[in-house]
Amino acid sequence: FNINMEDLELLDELGKGNYGSVRMVRHMTTKIDMAMKEIRLELDESKLHGIITELDILHRAIAPEIVEFYGAFFVESCVYYCIEYMDAGSLEALYDGPCSIPEDVLARIVGSMVRGLSFLKDELQIMHRDVKPTNVLMNTRGECKLCDFGVSGQLEKSLAKTNIGCQSYMAPERIKGESQNLVSTYTVASDVWSLGLTIVEVTLGTYPYPPETYSNVFAQLQAIVHGDPPQLPAMYTDVARDFTDGCLEKVPERRSTYASMLKHPWLIADAEKGKDGVDMKGWVEEALRKRGERKARESQTNIPAAVDAR
Ligand code: ATP
Ligand code: MG
């Protein structure tokens, strides 16, 4: 079905990214709750049309590890697209400090990510281009799904100009390529690096190249290109560490592929545990409970500070 702004009841804001905001909305006729992403673009109408047409291939992205796509439209200079609402939010909001994700839960999350990425490559011939903890979403059924992959070349082009974050998940070869203004020097192997960095971040409890340890963004990017790649904390088993090291090989040709990762002993052992072998639902519930406590603590400590400031 087609979705338009008039069909939607606007609910809470779910978050903000570099390019726009995400709101929860209810599709009034079907009563389906959705997440609606708004991206503000200064483009003419034909270009906006082009983006919507390109986004349409998302209707074919149907897999258990991919967030469902409901539709896209534009209003004035904003593109909107509606996707499945994931009620536990992103991985970034679920991890809490070092080693907060048990290894069996981690393996299951990583398995979903690898199958999702491999589906995008094999079935839709696209790479993700933006693998990072905020683009891995979970729900209270314990499911883990990917969102925000690059299907629209036009949209990517329009966003690229403003893309300066202080947390880069880009592979060394992609950073090198961009600094020399070479387009498409990177391939699907770059997504594998970003996957590895995501694994290390959620287990360390912090982005592996913390901005405060570098004097500027250039130095930080240099560390990614020239330094030793980060590793899983020692608490995790050698098999898990070996898997992650394979994603974070600096030379793209030596990096793991989706086929090799799916055959890796770490993911094989996870698959052998079967569907109910890991209590994903229990872990998500626990992580949400802790997140609620953290938020309550933060608001308690913030109130007196705000009063003092006045
Ligand atoms: P970027 O702008 O680089 O993509 P980002 O991923 O942090 O960064 P958004 O994609 O705009 O930014 O998402 C912002 C936040 O909204 C996410 O971190 C997540 O918490 C929330 N969010 C996004 N999509 C959904 C969804 N489908 N269900 C629930 N929450 C979502
Ligand atoms: Mg996102």
Image (tube, rainbow, N blue to C red):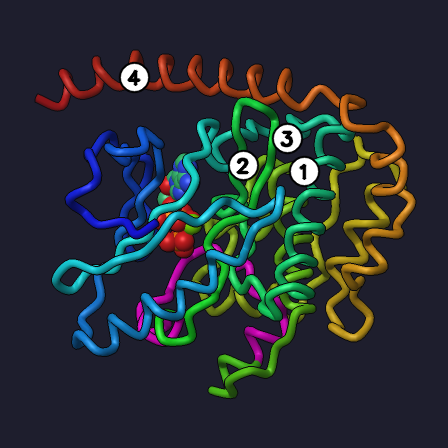
**Residue of label 2:** 91
The magenta segment: 156-176
> At numbered mark 3, what does the secondary structure look like: helix, strand or loop?
loop
Say few, some or many: other residues with alpha carbon within 10 Å of mark 4 (under 14 / 14 to 19 / 20 or more).
few
**Residue of label 4:** 299
Q: Is residue 8 above or below residue 76?
A: above
Is 54 magenta? The answer is no
Left or right position of 142 against 70: right
| Three-letter code, disc 2 | Leu
Determine if the C-beta at disc 2 is less than 8 A from ligand 1: no
Percent from the top left, x then y, of residue 216? 43, 63
| Three-letter code, disc 4 | Ser
Percent from the top left, x then y, of residue 161? 32, 74
> At numbered mark 4, what does the secondary structure look like: helix, strand or loop?
helix
Q: What residue sits 47% from the left and 87% below the top?
A: 181
Q: CA distance from mark 4 to mark 1?
A: 30 Å
**Residue of label 3:** 98
Percent from the top left, x then y, of residue 204? 64, 38
Q: What residue sits 50% from the left and 19% below the top?
A: 288
Residue extending furthest left?
310
Q: Is residue 138 above or below residue 55?
A: above
Check if mark 3's residue and mark 4's residue have beta carbons within 8 Å: no
Q: Closer to the N terminus: mark 3 or mark 4?
A: 3
**Residue of label 1:** 109
